[in-house]
Amino acid sequence: MKNVILTTILLMASTATFNSNAVEVTACSEADCVEYFKQYKIYAKRGYADAMTTLGDLYANGHGTDKNVKKALKQYRRAAKYGSVEAQYKAASLYLLEEDYYDIKSAIKYLKMAARNKAAEASLILSIIYFNEKHYEQDLGEVDKWLSMAYKLKPAIAIEFTVQVVASNLYSPTALPLLAKALERTPLAQVHSKLARQQTNKTDAVMADSRDHNSPQHGATSMTIKANSSSSATAPRRAARVSPPAPDGEMEVISVTSRLHDLFQAQLDHLNNTYPEQHAVTTGTKIAGRTCEETFKCAEMDKLVFEEIVGKMN
């Protein structure tokens, strides 16, 4: 049971779009990694959901600190509480992937939170869990709800399982009406055709790139990639690693290793200019930390003055 769900999670993780870093977080004990960990810990304590989520990533992978799944899960759960869809999904993933923390009911809880926030990957995993009684308690109503949602949001990631469901003896427009409507709007053949075109375009692009690399002009041109050199007081940047000077007549190779920390820095800079979710106060306005009395919309007005203004407008 767990192996099937685990495989599904791993497949979904490769297509999930929740991670704003878009770069794999790896184990690291270098000084700048430790410093970024400290900075995220500070912002997480201040109540920033995105900082909690990234701190969870750092704990989960041992980046700037010792690997600690328990603390990673704690940070994901905190961030999930304050609306981070990425954290909701990652908390669910840990509950399914980590042997010591395996808890399918808790995983379902967080998957539903993410799915309600239109995370197609979470919706798809929910439909898989509910479809087969070997995974969990079979519930076609739940399958219909979540699979139709995943298919509408991202047909490409849901098509394979949708085909399996439609081919099963459990499928019928009556049993799964929401999925039937979704398939009516976007037929499976249409999705297959679109994916085939995308694959053809990718293949053409790769072949064109290969031809460019083999051209004489390409061989005569070199490209230097530079890391962003802007700095901030909130956290340090990781310097690019430069190889020893090359002998005369040979090209010096510069390996840029700062992309992940550039993304960390950009996120920290953004957080520094926003209001933390944890300490936001519901005030009746959409302006964080502002009370109704501080806005025109909610400001009190004497009844006679109000009637006088309305009378002039009429």
Image (tube, rainbow, N blue to C red):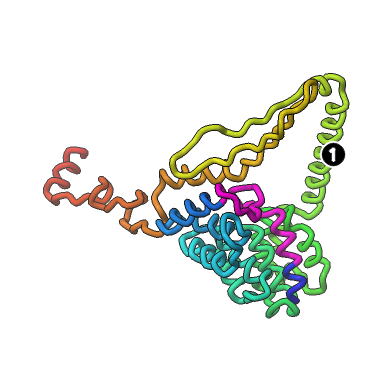
Q: Which residue is mark 1?
A: 203
Q: Name the image quarter holding residue 104.
A: bottom right
Residue in view at x 83 percent, y 23 percent:
219
Horizontal side of residue 271 vs 305, given as left or right: right
Residue 8, magenta (yes or no): yes
Q: Position of residue 276 (x, y in %)?
A: 40, 53
Viewer-closest of 194 and 198: 198
Q: Amino acid at mark 1?
A: Thr
Residue 19 magenta-highlighted: yes
> Which residue of the protein is positioned furthest toward the left in this rendering?
304
User: Which of the image's four quarters has the C terminus?
Assistant: top left
Seen from the viewer's position, the closer of residues 4 and 22 is 22
Q: Quadrant of residue 117?
A: bottom right
Residue at x-position 26% and y-position 53%: 292
18 left or right of 299? right
Magenta part of the chain: 7-33
Residue 132 image point, x, y percent: 75, 75
Q: Position of residue 247 (x, y in %)?
A: 78, 25
Q: Which residue is painted at 84% across and 30% down in the image?
A: 208
Residue drawn at point x = 57 percent, y = 59 percent: 65
